[in-house]
Image: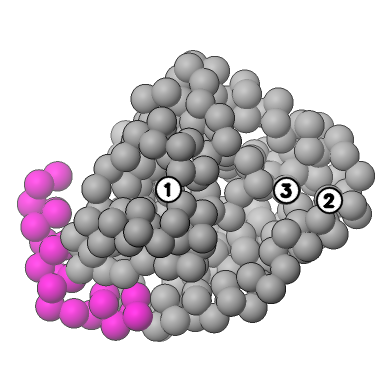
Amino acid sequence: MSAIVETTDGVMTIRFDRQEKKNAMTAAMYAAAAEALERAAEESEVRALLFLGRQDFSAGNDIADFLAAGAMHAKIEDLPVVRFLQRLVACEKPVLAGVNGVAIGIGTTLLLHCDGVVAGASARFALPFVPLGLVPEAGSSLLLPRAVGRNRASWLLLSGERFSADEARAMGLIAEIVPDEEVEARARTMAAQLAALPPNAMRTTKRLIRGADAAALAAAMSAEFAAFAEAMRSDEARAAFMRFLTKV
């Protein structure tokens, strides 16, 4: 499964644990994370959620698993990644993340849905959708321009160029940078701080922050899912996947 879920002192930790592949996400990992988010929504003892990796946060989708699962031929709404993203967007409890190493593709876009992100000094980010013949996901076509500005977001989404933790903080994508070895401790402290606060006030404040963006986000994600499904079946995506797989 390669995802470890545990709850301690009101904080549910979802740890991606496939370090030999830099936590490249498989269908099983998405399913486990989605299930954890569903449980968190129902369990009153869960007051905050925390995403962690190990040496790396996530290298994005595992292309080989993606192809082996027949994802290019499946209905987009049936994919575990869609279930995961829908549960993440719907989460009314605070969501935090501690990022080490690489945060590629969804390793970066899921951070747009977090309420606090701390990264290690050597963390590296990228959104290589276009180079893979794909399009943005997780509402990033809407949320990234609003977070970092349209021009900068366009460059990052179109080029797939990597950027550093310092650049991510300057853009407002992450809240703090700490030494790599302090990421998990700091992220846990932040999660515990929010978990200790009044839950109803927390839930209402999250809803107010989203405000009118909730409808816009739902529309953006629906458009992204449709475009992603079409892109997956394109010849250029197939060619890009094959080029990628010959390099690994």
Crowdedness near tag 3: few (<14), some (14–19) or many (≥20) residues, C-alpha within 10 Å: many
Residue 28 appears in view? no
Residue 227 in percent (x, y) is at 35, 80
Q: Which quarter of the figure has residue 243?
A: bottom left
Q: Amino acid at mark 3?
A: Pro
Which numbered marker is on residue 107?
1
Check disc 2 and report the residue beneath it.
Answer: 202
Q: Secondary structure beneath disc 1?
A: helix
**Viewer-nearest residue: 149 or 199:** 149
Check disc 3 and report the residue beneath it.
Answer: 94
- Residue at the image position 49 percent from the left and 80 percent from the top: 222
**Viewer-nearest residue: 209 or 9:** 209
- Residue at the image position 78 percent from the left and 62 percent from the top: 208
What secondary structure is the magenta-colored segment mainly?
helix
Crowdedness near tag 2: few (<14), some (14–19) or many (≥20) residues, C-alpha within 10 Å: some
Does residue 45 belong to the magenta stretch? no
Q: CA separation, marks 2 and 1?
A: 25 Å
- Residue at the image position 9 percent from the left and 47 percent from the top: 247
Q: Amino acid at mark 1?
A: Gly
Answer left or right for 161 relative to 223.
left
Q: Which residues are magenta?
A: 227-248
Confirm or deny contact between disc 2 and disc 3 (CB under 8 A): yes
Q: Which quarter of the figure has residue 21?
A: top left
Does residue 242 belong to the magenta stretch? yes
**Viewer-nearest residue: 158 or 186:** 158
Is residue 223 shown above or below 40? Answer: below
- Residue at the image position 61 percent from the left and 49 percent from the top: 114
Q: Amino acid at mark 2?
A: Met
Is residue 179 shown above or below 247? Answer: above
Q: Earlier in the sequence, mark 3 or mark 1?
A: 3
